[in-house]
Image (cartoon, coloured by chain):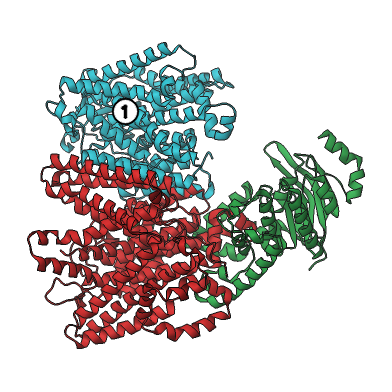
Chain colours: A red, B green, C cyan
Amino acid sequence: MVVADTVVSLGVFASFYALLALGMNIKYGHTGLLDFGHVGFYLIGAYTAALFVLPPESGSPGTVYVVGLNLPWVVAAAAAMLVAGVVGALVALPTLRLREDYLAITVLGVSAIFQRVVQAESWLVNGPDALRGIEPPLTGRFPVGGRTVFGAIAIALIGGAIWAVATWALGQALEMDGSSGTGGTDAARADGSGGQESRATLAGRLHAVATLGTDRLLGDRGGSGRGNRALSAAVDRGRNGYVGSSLLAGVVAGVVGAIVTFIAPVGLLAWGTVVSVFTWLVLLVGLGRYAGGFDAIDYAVTLALGAGYMLALAPMFFLDSLVLWVPLTLLAFGVVIGVTLFLRANWSRFASRPFRYGTFVGLWFGVIWYFPLQVLSSLRAGDAMAAATTLFNNTVWVLSLSAPEPIIGYSRFQLFLFGAIVFLSVYLLGLVVDSPFGRVLRAIRNDERVVSSLGKDPFTYKIQSMAIGSALAGLAGALAALYYQTLVFTMFAPRVTFIALLMMFLGGVGNNRAMVVGAVLYWAFEAATTELAGFVPPDIRENLQALRFVIMGVLFLVLLYYRPEGLLGERSRTGVGSE
Amino acid sequence: MTDAPLLEVDDLRKRFGGITAVDGASFSLERGTITGLIGPNGAGKTTTFDLISGFYRPDGGTIRFEGRDIQKIMRPTAGEKGIWSSASASGFGLLGASAGRVLYGVSPAVLGGAAALGAGAGVGIYFGQAAVNNRRSGFKHSRPFRLARAGMVRTFQITRELEEMTVLENLLLAPQHQDGENLFNALFRRGTVADDEAAIREDAAEVIDLLDLDHLRDERAGNLSGGQRKLLELGRVLMLEPDLVLLDEPVAGVNPALTDRIMDAIASMRDEGYGFCIVEHDMEVIMNLSDRIVVMSEGKKLSEGSPTDIQQDEAVLEAYLGG
Amino acid sequence: MQGKIRVRCTMPPTTALLQAIITGIATGSMIALGAIGLSMVYSIAEVPNFAHGDLLTLGAYTALVVNKPGNVPFLELLTTGTQARTLTGTVVVFLITAVGVLGAVYALGGVDALGGSWWPTNPPAAVGAAVHIAAAAAVGLVVAWGAPSIVVGMIFSGAVVATLAPLQERYVFGKFRQKNVSLALMLVVSLAVAFVLRYGIQTVFGGTARSYAIQPTVDVFGASVNVAVVKFIDLYVMDGGLFLNVTDPVSDGVLFTGSWSWLVVVAILAVSAVVGYAGYRFRRGERAILGPYLLGTIAGLAAFVGLSAVLATGGSVPESSLYATRVRLSILRMFIIVLALGMMGVLHTLLRATKLGKAMRATSDNRELAQIRGIDTERVTMSVWVLAGLFAGIGGVTLGFLFGTLTITMGFFILLPMFAAVILGGITIYGALFGSYIVGLAMEVGIFAIPGLSATYRVPIAFVVLILVLLVKPEGITG
């Protein structure tokens, strides 16, 4: 299997879990409501969506459910959000007046009630047995290749959206460079001129190319239009500065892509390659910006450490005997961790930027796994052609190349679909959080009595926060239902709430974008450990899987203690007001 | 506007367990004046404040704000009662319907009946709970925030800031009826919200200017000194443009320079027509600032008059020395 | 089984309500086993501990070391069969127990505590140390000697978990408390600890369910009685009086038969009431460990049970009766009721009669104030964790016994009703006891009272009751 596929499926998981974490973040991160029953709304969303999508009951034995509406998934997802949101508000009515710990435990109880209802009422959604047959949208139409109308439309959408997001992200990276001066070296740069100056850099040129000239088109108009509302522009610029041109670039790119793939036989391959390479370039630029003042030594050290962690796993790969590799692997890990901690404690470069270093060590580890490790066996066999093919496959991640013809398979479409939903949610939530409404929510998290003494009813805001958070959990549930296609009540154990909490604290409490990072990190850990579990004999695999939860729990505790604001931290708002 | 006094306290009483904190205090105050509320420790000043601002329910007596009983102001409106009881009714109706479904099957009559029963129970529970709570404390079902909306705002003896928010954000939060506080507007009417926000930011800039908080604008409120917090609280009150401001020890623990600035700010606001009621231990401040002074002792009003009258009142002197 | 019963001609019907109430009391006791510790930690150490359920699980699995060492990873090497162990194995069990006891003492205040610093009197360190070591050795010997027995397993689990529970406080919760984190964050922390504990157990034991090797029968006065199977307790109301018959449906043996004429019944009731009232008068107005109500109740009940046993006359099952009822209850559930009562007694004595108990109550009321008044809240907190661990260890084994199989989620299963009970009681120790029985009764009577409601709904009922109570009293019943 090509690892690009693994990463794609990881992305799908991460996307609906990111929505779950986003919901939790609205409740806890922004409003301070600790909802231990978050999974309950995920459950409601999942089953609501399932009932909306399922065809009317056919009378087949073993599958009983109350109603099948056979509606399109868009309606189902909307209904899931609505129902979960309303139920969230209803649950909030009696519980919100309680102390925070009572609230948490009571809503946990409510989620347990939901779970038990699903389990016990066999007429509702097939009781303790699995509810099967949830048809994901458009499965029949995939995989798509080039040269068909549907294919062209799908490719226009997918390619266009990826292009738009990547262009926007690139713009953001430039903006970050211009305004905040992360590395310290660019701090002297003036606020306004940053964007202009960065045009001259390589990344700036890339952005100029990527926008396909559309920024020029919009540039003048956008500037004067915003001038009237200088203040709101100041608020908006950081986030929306490049939205218009990115969208337009996406549309243009999508149309071009559709035409190319429809006309030329190798069009799809070429188009996929261009889009993929573009995303890699954007990733590189982003990382480059993030690295800030990194020089060759920094890169080399992080690379060495990343490679060290990968090497520490080597005994596992190459030795068959459990008695041999377990102690060796542990020893190797001990050594690498020891070296890392030593550097962290004694080397000023590392100590001054521990998180950036840590991120890069992790990145190098991932990069080594994604590229060189995948071609290792081919190279050892001397098959350079196979190695090159694998590398190419992993680079052109937008297409799956395992079939004779390049295609866009269903999982990639799903990633695109879910990713777009996550992106839209993060964007809309950003608007909510930065509005005066979001300000009241944060004030409630700080001190409810102040809000009350200023003439605002905290209760109505808390209800709305619960409704929004629950609706997001419901949306996550709907996507999960479409992804798994089968629902069982055991999927909605309180563990899911714990994972959502973990993602939230991992990314950064109160920071919406960090939820995506938290979800991706969690699933990366999950995927990595699953992969590793393949190396142990089946009879202790279960123990090992439990062990990884132990590690996860311990890491969570360490995180809560040493960095309760999460890896990314709460997004600083101090800059928002500056004109 | 009625010509009733801005605030009228009549025979106010409050007991905590066996201790009588306020024992029949009566006084009133007018627009555009500063009234000082003084008295020895334990005289019941802060409790009186808590009663006036609606955080406690008095055991006896009335408090009228612009002629309206504050208990009436805080009481849930008929609309709210309707929303709440129907929410309760629909919740329990749903519960009843599903119970009926579980117990007796899906006949519409059963479902309807069970739902109606549940809804009835829901309404009953809502009003029953409201009654129980009203008898017990009265606080759970009353709406102290409504006093602020009506135009009466208080500050706290121990300042309460939104520590994780900046000074500017603390001020921006305060104004009433902001367009962007509505979720729908925040998402779909962003132009209106932006205009509103711009206006509020202008107000905030003025307040920051007035209070000389310019250099701290983007500082987190949690990092401010005690005096700066007092200023910030005052600023928040200014943003609200209330009719009556209750200040609980506005200059306690504040350095002299800041004290002067706070006093100036209060005096100039008084001249704009705000009414103030101030609890303060610093006699110099209170005597300089107040137009009238109410002296409390052991929960009762001991004396009332202009600062000069009070300074010559022997009963007051006695209370302070004896207390 | 049915056939055997039919021979008896008059099989009294099960009275469901009475049955539900009795079962509810048993369930309430089961909840109380854990809720006592949970409420102590919640109210005194101020940790809403989600990991408490997993402490029970830990206790249940720990007893395997004594009861079925052949089933414990790494310990298999020291065994010769599922239950028999080698000499080394016995020594290991002895050492673990002794270290457990000493560790629990150590948790109370480090090396000083081992020297007896926590005693009410101030003994010389050598004396304290000697007594502790002797006690540890004694408990160790009892465990090593009594090995596969499950009762010994309880002692063993109690000692081990009592040592492990304070470690949570020292290395996790205490650290976070120093950072002054909010209660909400403490909840999240405890959730993470629960995760670590639960999956830690699974890491060692794997996913397969375990069970104890128990002799289901126990010799009681020469008759062997199966403790896990329900007994039938039949009560007949006749013209002439009452008849009580306790039978074992499996062995068809009669465990107890007694009949009382109406005169005797009235006499017993009257005497019991008088004794109870005398007990109440004896202590009226005093604040002793055995307060007036408690003493009165105990005296009255003791008189009732004693007199009933003494005055019972034999007889045979009547052919006809005005009213007959049957309650099913296993010895094991009775044992749980008694065990819960015993724990409550210990706790009550501790809280009322000892200095530590007073300190605990003061800390529970107000931690800062207690500190100002010179109470070593640190030590109080640690002792609370030791006690909670002890009770969790014993309770966990009992639950494992009752459930038949040990699973890693068994603790979490019981945690939700436990939390419902504790919050219902307003986070006080006595409130939690009260809450446990309310929740237990609500669960069983609710399932009985609403036809068509499956047993899956036990936990939901607990929470519906909790939410309804909180609607009216948001601070809980005693809050």
Coordinates of residue C154 in the picture (x, y in percent): 29, 27
Q: Residues within 10 Å of mark 1 (few under 14, many from 20)?
A: many
Q: Is residue C221 above or below residue A470?
A: above
| Quarter of the figure with the N terminus of chain A | bottom left
The residue at the point 22 percent across, 69 percent down is A395
Residue C113 visible (yes or no): yes
The residue at the point 14 percent across, 70 percent down is A402
Q: Nearer the viewer, residue A91 or C364?
A: C364
Q: Residue furthest front?
A: A296
Q: Nearer the viewer, residue A162 or B239?
A: A162
Coordinates of residue A184 in the picture (x, y in percent): 47, 60
Left/right of residue B57 with respect to residue C53 in the rendered view = right
| Residue type at tag 1 | Val
Coordinates of residue C390 in the picture (x, y in percent): 36, 28
Left/right of residue A484 with respect to residue C79 in the rendered view = right
Left/right of residue A83 with respect to residue A180 in the rendered view = left
The residue at the point 41 percent across, 35 percent down is C169
Q: Nearer the viewer, residue A436 or C209?
A: A436
Residue matched to label 1? C160
